[in-house]
Amino acid sequence: SVGTSDTIWQSNNGIDWSTVTMNTEESTWKSIASDKLGNVVVLGSDQNVEISNDHGDTWTLSDINGTTQNWNVLVYGNNKFLSIESNGSGDVAYSTDNGENWTIVENALTPRNWINATYGNGRFVIIDNNGNTAISFDGISWQENSIGNNTSGMSYVSYGAGIFIASGDSNIISKSADGLHWRTWGNDSTVFTATQEQDWKSSAYGSSEWIIVSASGLVFNKIETGAAPVLR
């Protein structure tokens, strides 16, 4: 677990947590990603990268080729770790050796505040803070689109059960089968409108169930693929 402090926390069961000793002091650890083999990469605000090859027990310090770009997004998929620059260059960086070395693809994207990413169905999907999205199968070539009207503040994206879910503080939740074309949950309009105004945050899928939480603690829950979310 990472956040807006210089501390990283580790847990084997999600209940009991302990702090992790890192190789550098960071004001903010921005993002974390892992594969299924115990390789973990953490992205820091000073462009440092911490690497672990043993499920987070020990760490090694690295960086993205000594660059000074504002790398803000980190995700794993297609046998590579991928990071997106979010301060105006549109650059993408990827590593195929678990974060030790990085290749930078310049001007791969339209310069935006790319803020969140996921991987599923054989593709990377990223989103900015205004409902613009982009997909890539290899992390190098990208195709961009927008979720639709009135999606300012929609800046979270995740994958599960064959669909991508986008949410944010615009009081709407949208889904997509391919990460590029978006519509409402269960009908043909562009977005699903929540029953009350919320700053919708992260979403996750597990045990045949979607969970989408808001900043105030409200939860949208969806169990069956064809059903609309239910406010809990």
Image (spheres, rainbow, N blue to C red):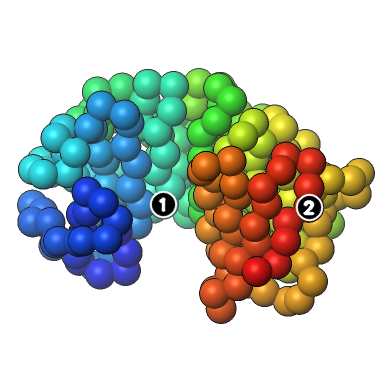
Q: Is residue 36 visible?
A: yes
The quadrant holding residue 93 is top left
Viewer-nearest of discs 2 and 1: 2
Q: In which quarter of the image is residue 197?
A: bottom right
The reply to whether dot 2 and dot 1 touch (C-beta < 8 Å) is no
Quarter of the picture containing the C terminus is bottom right
**x then y, percent, for residue 217:** 54, 74
Q: Point out which mark residue 204 bears.
A: none
> Dot 2 lies on which element?
loop
Q: Which residue is drawn at 14% across and 62% down?
A: 19
What percent of the width, then of the height, locates residue 100? 20, 30
Asked whether 230 or 216 is in front, the reply is 230
Label 1 sits on what residue type?
A: Asn
Decide which of tag 2 and tag 1 comes sooner along the chain. 1
Which residue is the site of mark 2? 228
Q: Is residue 42 left or right of residue 152?
A: left
Q: Which residue is drawn at 31% across and 22% down?
A: 96
**Drawn side of residue 151 relative to residue 4, left or right:** right
Judge from the rendering whether residue 198 lies leftward or rightward of residue 216; answer left or right.
right
Q: Which mark is residue 72?
A: 1
Identified by mark 2, the residue type is: Ala
Residue 197 drawn above or below residue 42: below
Which residue is depicted at the point 72% across and 40% down?
Answer: 225
Which quadrant of the rendered structure holds the N terminus?
bottom left
Q: Report crowding for label 2: few under 14, some 14 to 19, many 20 or more residues within 10 A (C-alpha).
A: some
Residue 142 image position (x, y, % from top left): 60, 28
Q: How far apart are marks 2 and 1 (CA)?
A: 32 Å
Q: Is residue 47 visible?
A: no
